């Protein structure tokens, strides 16, 4: 892998330094142990989801003592008691001597309802799947090799699809109402192209929420497309939703100029840097003249000081655990430059938690660049 950061971010990194404030040895030790805590917290979260502990607590908002929770879930009382105390220490649960343990505020919708709009219940499992890659890091660091996302096994791909299934729902619930022009077009009916459709969750979410839309998803990863096709069939949406596998670099001719909306959910950063301009140019060519491109992704810090910005840290970490996949997160400025090169003008930008969202439309009088 080449040092892409040195290629596209040289100027900012050449000008600015990042220094630690005055601190102490105990404070630095606490910081390291805090990072180690995160590993074990991820396993605790995953176990709480898989064993139904969060779900059972969500069904009993008044609280349960550890023994009652263990009995309700068919688990050992001693282990469950330890899980409860640790989850309380992590501020996932609250405790009352009279009523026992209950979910901390908002943890019901984040962890106890896997099909809920704002559920993060699938993310611990997905991140544990990411952790499997670390076994190869010493080899890849020495050789510069990569392990592309598409080369992971079906268990890995399914875990990631399950975790990110909630993101289109979050977008529709929390972000779309702030984009009234986009929402109005979907209400009246629009043709949507989802680029990098994965397991099809964005396609299905949009189709179910807006019964007048027609959706086409495309992807180059066959396992994910097969999952998308099954999901579409299971939801009874085959009459107006389809997922296609692209087997070469060309897009079918029927995609050109056919869509009011092109979406990309966590896709731009997964495209090889050498191909991003061409893919965005194809997205622009797929739009009707009054259409829009929606990017839902993550943005990398624009300056070294932002590496320690609390709103940016997860983008930095995502670049870390995806670096051996060959992925590269772009800065806000790089995304704007890519859009301009594709003949698109950014008209809106916003954020949802760690995610960066951009709406772009064809620039007046522009002709999208040929890929």
Image: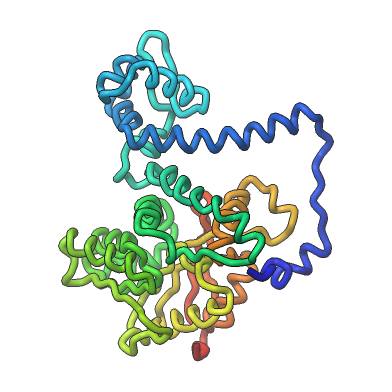
**Quadrant of the rendered structure where residue 257 is?**
bottom left
Q: Nearer the viewer, residue 19 or 168?
A: 19
17 lies above or below 108 = below
Q: Nearer the viewer, residue 66 or 148?
A: 148
**Quadrant of the rendered structure where residue 338 is?**
bottom right
Residue located 33% across and 65% down the image? 224
Answer yes or no: is residue 168 visible: no
Lateral position of residue 268 relative to residue 225, left or right: right
Residue 164 point in image, percent of width and height: 40, 54
Residue 165 point in image, percent of width and height: 35, 54
Q: Nearer the viewer, residue 14 or 230?
A: 230
275 lies above or below 333 = below
48 lies above or below 18 = above
**Quadrant of the rendered structure where residue 1 is?**
bottom right
Residue located 42% across and 13% down the image? 96
Residue located 36% across and 81% down the image? 247
Residue 196 point in image, percent of width and height: 40, 70
Residue 350 point in image, percent of width and height: 52, 58
Most distant residue in the top direction:
98
The number of numbered discs placed on residues in the rendered structure image is: 0
Residue located 34% across and 89% down the image? 253
Answer yes or no: is residue 276 visible: yes
């Amino acid at each position: 892998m080449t040092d892409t950061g040195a290629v596209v971010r040289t100027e900012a990194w050449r000008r600015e330094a990042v220094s630690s404030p005055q601190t102490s040895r105990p404070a630095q030790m606490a910081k390291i142990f805090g990072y180690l805590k995160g590993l074990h917290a991820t396993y605790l979260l995953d176990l709480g989801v898989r064993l139904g502990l969060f779900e059972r607590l969500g069904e009993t908002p008044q609280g349960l003592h550890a023994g009652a929770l263990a009995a309700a879930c068919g688990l050992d009382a001693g282990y469950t008691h330890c899980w409860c105390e640790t989850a309380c220490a992590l501020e996932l649960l609250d405790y009352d001597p009279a009523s026992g343990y209950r979910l901390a505020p908002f943890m019901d919708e984040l962890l106890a309802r896997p099909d809920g709009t704002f559920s993060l219940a699938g993310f611990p499992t997905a991140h544990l799947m990411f952790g499997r890659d670390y076994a190869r890091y010493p080899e890849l660091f020495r050789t510069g090799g990569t392990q592309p996302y598409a080369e992971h096994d079906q268990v890995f791909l399914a875990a990631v699809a399950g975790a990110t299934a909630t993101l289109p729902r979050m977008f529709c619930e929390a972000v779309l109402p702030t984009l009234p022009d986009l929402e109005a077009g979907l209400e009246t009916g629009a043709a949507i192209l989802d680029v990098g459709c994965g397991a099809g969750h964005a396609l299905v979410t949009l189709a179910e929420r807006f019964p007048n839309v027609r959706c086409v998803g495309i992807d180059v990863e066959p396992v994910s497309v097969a999952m998308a096709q099954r999901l579409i069939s299971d939801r009874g949406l085959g009459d107006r939703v389809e997922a296609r596998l692209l087997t070469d670099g060309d897009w079918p001719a029927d995609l050109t100029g056919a869509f009011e909306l092109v979406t990309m959910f966590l896709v731009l950063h997964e495209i090889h840097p050498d191909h991003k301009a061409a893919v965005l140019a194809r997205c622009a060519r797929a739009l009707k003249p009054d259409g829009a491109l929606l990017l839902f992704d993550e943005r990398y810090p624009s300056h070294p000081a932002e590496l320690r910005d609390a709103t940016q840290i997860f983008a930095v970490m995502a670049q870390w655990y995806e670096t051996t996949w060959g992925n590269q997160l772009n800065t806000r400025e790089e995304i704007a430059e890519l859009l301009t090169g594709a003949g698109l003008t950014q008209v809106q930008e916003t954020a949802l938690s760690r995610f960066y969202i951009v709406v772009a439309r064809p620039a007046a009088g522009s002709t999208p660049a040929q890929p």
